[in-house]
Each structure stands twice: as C-alpha cells, then as structure tokens.
Amino acid sequence: ALSFAPSLPTQTKSTVGSVHHHLPLVVSLQASSTSDPTGVRDRNIIALDDDGDASAPPLIVLGGMAQSIQSWSLQLSALQRGSGRRVFMYEPLGQGKRPETITPPRKYFEDVSMEKQGKDFWDVVDAAFPDSEVDVAGFSFGGRIAMAASVLQPGRIRGLHLTGVGAERDALADVLVKSWRDVLGAWPDHSSWSQDTSRLRAFAWGVILATYSEQALSSAGYDRLQTWVEIVCENNTEEGLRAILDQTHDVDGEWTPLTMAARISSKTRVKVVVGFDDKISPPHQAERLAVILNGSAESNNFKVLKNCGHAAPMEAARAWRQDVLEFFA
C-alpha cells in the first residue's frame, strides 16, 4: 500500500541517536555490521532522537509496500514530538533503491520473504538498539513484517500497533493484488537494471486508486495524484516491488497473518486499526485478526477510523497518530 507526505526537510548524514532539532536524520549503517550477504545496511534508515527518553523502548515505524521514508516525514516528526522518545524507521527488503554496490541486481531481491523480512528487522534494529525491547507501529506490508519479527523473537516487541492488516484477503483484494503483479510482469531474463518506469507508473496508479478512499482521491485531484506516482517511481524499483508481490503474497504456511497471529506471544500487547473504506484489508477481516490476537475485539485492541480507506495513516493522519500515541503511552 502507498501514501505520501511532502518532501523531507533538509537531510543530514549522521549516526543513530544524533540530535538535530526534530529534523529527520538519514542514517547509513554499514554492511560490515550485518550477517546478511546483500549488505542491507546500505538502505535508507531514519532516526529521530532530539533528547528522546533513552529509558523508554524506541518506537519503530514500518510503512506500506511501495512507500519510502519520504512518505512518512511529517508523521515521524509528529510521533517523536508527541511521544518524547526515539523514533526509528527503515525501508525493508525490496523497498527503496538498490545500493549500487550490490551486483547483480537480482541478488538484492533474491529473498524478500516474510521470514527473511522478520530476520532482517532484528538485524537492523539490533544494530541501532542492541538487545532493547521495542514498540512497533506497522502499516499494511509493514504490519505483516512486524508480526513476523514478533514471532521470531517472542516477547521482545512490547507493543504492536497494526494498521491495514487483516486475517485474510477478500475476493476484491485478491483481484487487486493479482492485477498489480500482472502489471509488473515476470522477472526479466537478463540481469541488467530496468530503466523503463512505464510498468512501475501503471502499478503506482493502480495501487493509489485502490488504497485511498473516493473522498481522498477527489480531494487530491489529478495533478497531486500524478505527483504521488512520480514519488513511487523515484523511490522504488520495479524489480523490488515485483519480488515483494511474488514472495510475500499468495503464500501458504507459517508466514500468513492468520498463522502468525496464532504464534505471537501473549506478552505482546496488540491493537488492530483499519479504515472504514479499506478495500485491501476490510474492517471485518481486521476485526477477525484482532479477535485471534486478543481473544476478542474491544475498544482497547480494535478500532475503525471513519472516512478513510486502506491508507488510514495518511488520510486520517491526526486520528491515526493520536491512536498510536495513546496505545504506546
């Protein structure tokens, strides 16, 4: 899923934990500090500190499939100010631009499965916050990664706030996801990096139209929507998104939301949030997930945000952010 915010403020190269007046800090954790052969530390990472409470678990934010850190610039800054603690975000495997040092291109997206994403989560987080408990707010694809991470290290995620994640996909959502895969096509037989963005643009239009409510699309208008499409093309690759769709959708076994929910530790507090008009993870599927995770769907662990679609964190930004802050307070 995707949604966007205005461009980031002036970015500063720094290290995790640096202070810069609430401005996002783009951080590059070195590949040598990870066991992953693809050097995932070369991806974009952002840390907002500004004297955040070091005694409180950091808040990790994970975005939707074709989002980037840029998509979350305003939300991240507001979450840091509202919580008074460290806020951290990174672009999972398959998102963002491939580091130029990784060749051939296929190697970078060879394994972006949900199990791998969960392991990668802890690689990245441990490099910044060794052995620390964390709180996680995950949206859509990011929510599923958060669930995988919680399964792999039970109890270490103290609180899990999931938005736009359902137990299973309905027929409409299944058709939409399969159409995105069809637009991106099969993986090319060659190893060169694709420069043609025509399929990526078609994909971006399809996802935007499916994940926002009619009201939001009408309000945004064509010119603004076209800008969002450009942001997708500038901050993602056809190959990476295709790998995510191929390896994390329509898969059976241990890493579906349904099966992961049954394995998440009871020590982890979980809340599920969904937009009223969500076509990808409709409210009844999100409520079903909340029941599996918590035994019931009550006001403290399930919420429907009105007047928004799948992209609830952007369409209902203030209400979503307030819910996150209250849940992790």
Image: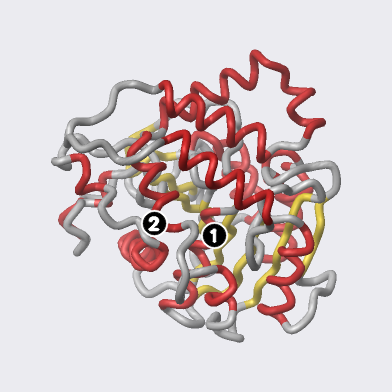
According to the picture, the residue beneath numbered tag 1 turns out to be 59
Residue 96 % position (x, y): 38, 39
Q: SS of the residue at dot 1?
A: strand
Residue 284 % position (x, y): 78, 63
Please tell me how crowded label 1 is: few (under 14), some (14-19), or many (20+) other residues with Cα within 10 Å.
many
Image-based side of 75 in relation to 59, left or right: right
According to the picture, the residue beneath numbered tag 2 turns out to be 247
Image color mode: secondary structure
Mark 1 is on which residue type? Leu
Residue 23 % position (x, y): 50, 36
For image coordinates 42% across by 79% down, the residue present is 153
- Please tell me which residue lies in front, 30 or 259: 259
**Count of all numbered marks drawn on residues in the image:** 2
Q: SS of the residue at dot 2?
A: helix
Res 34 → quadrant: bottom left
- Please tell me which residue lies in front, 62 or 274: 274
Q: Nearer the viewer, mark 1 or mark 2?
A: 2
Q: Earlier in the sequence, mark 1 or mark 2?
A: 1
Is 269 located above or below residue 222 in the figure? below
For image coordinates 71% across by 50% down, the residue present is 321
